[in-house]
């Protein structure tokens, strides 16, 4: 008969501990999400999904890119990586963002594209349930409903980066 290192009672305790350790520390509801609330010059609040954000940078000198649409604010160098910076305010037809001390560049990765998004101000991170989002509506010709995942708390338009970046790709392809 083979001897075991632990008694049946001890083995049961160890097995229970193993099961607890193997489980994630926080049970995450699939409906839970978060966005970084930002503001453009026009004081409209938008949310960028946190899951798409790689990094937030202070505004830095951008190289202008000739023969590009107005919504391309420029290109920055991030650790030897060239990143196009988009001015979504201009893309939405609401004018260019003016640079100020609170301006930031939010580097995102969505739709297999890595770009920076220029913003006038970051307000903070907000957590929400997807059921809390009201359906988007078209406010002007530039902000199409497919660019917005939904509206949170009646004042924050949560951006659908996949649709925006795919639309930008189509616009850029047609101008080349």
Image: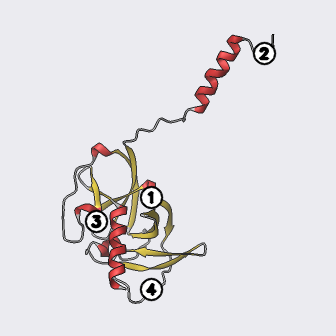
Residue 4 disc label = 2
Seen at 48% across and 79% down, the residue is 75
Q: Nearer the viewer, mark 3 or mark 2?
A: 2
Marks 1 and 2, how far apart in space?
50 Å
Q: Which residue is mark 3?
A: 43
Marks 4 and 1, how far apart in space?
25 Å
Give the class, few, some or many, for how many residues have Cα within 10 Å of label 4's Cα (few <14, many ≥20): some
Residue 64 disc label = 4
The numbered mark, 4 or 1, whose residue comes first in the sequence reads 1
The answer to which of 129 and 30 lies nearer the viewer is 30
Give the class, few, some or many, for how many residues have Cα within 10 Å of label 3's Cα (few <14, many ≥20): few
Q: Which residue is mark 1?
A: 52
Seen at 67% across and 21% down, the residue is 14
The numbered mark, 1 or 2, whose residue comes first in the sequence reads 2
Q: Nearer the viewer, mark 4 or mark 2?
A: 2
In this image, 129 relative to 57: left or right?
left
The numbered mark, 3 or 4, whose residue comes first in the sequence reads 3
Marks 3 and 2, how far apart in space?
69 Å
Q: Nearer the viewer, mark 1 or mark 2?
A: 2
The numbered mark, 4 or 2, whose residue comes first in the sequence reads 2
Element assignment for label 3: loop
């Amino acid at each position: 008969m083979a001897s075991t290192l632990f008694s049946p009672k001890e083995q049961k305790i160890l097995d229970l501990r193993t099961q607890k350790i193997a489980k994630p520390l926080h049970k995450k509801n699939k409906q839970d999400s978060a966005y970084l609330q930002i503001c453009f010059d026009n004081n409209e609040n938008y949310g960028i999904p946190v899951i798409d954000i790689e990094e937030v940078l202070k505004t830095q000198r951008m190289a202008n890119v000739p023969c590009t649409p107005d919504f391309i604010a420029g290109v920055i160098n991030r650790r030897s990586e060239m990143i196009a910076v988009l001015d979504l305010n201009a893309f939405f037809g609401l004018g260019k963002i003016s640079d100020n001390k609170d301006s930031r560049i939010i580097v995102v990765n969505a739709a297999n594209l890595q770009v920076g998004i220029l913003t006038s101000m970051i307000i903070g991170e907000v957590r929400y349930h997807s059921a809390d989002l009201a359906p988007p509506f078209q406010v002007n010709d530039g902000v199409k409903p497919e660019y917005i995942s939904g509206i949170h708390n009646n004042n924050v338009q949560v951006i659908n980066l996949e649709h925006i970046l795919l639309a930008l790709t189509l616009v850029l392809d047609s101008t080349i």
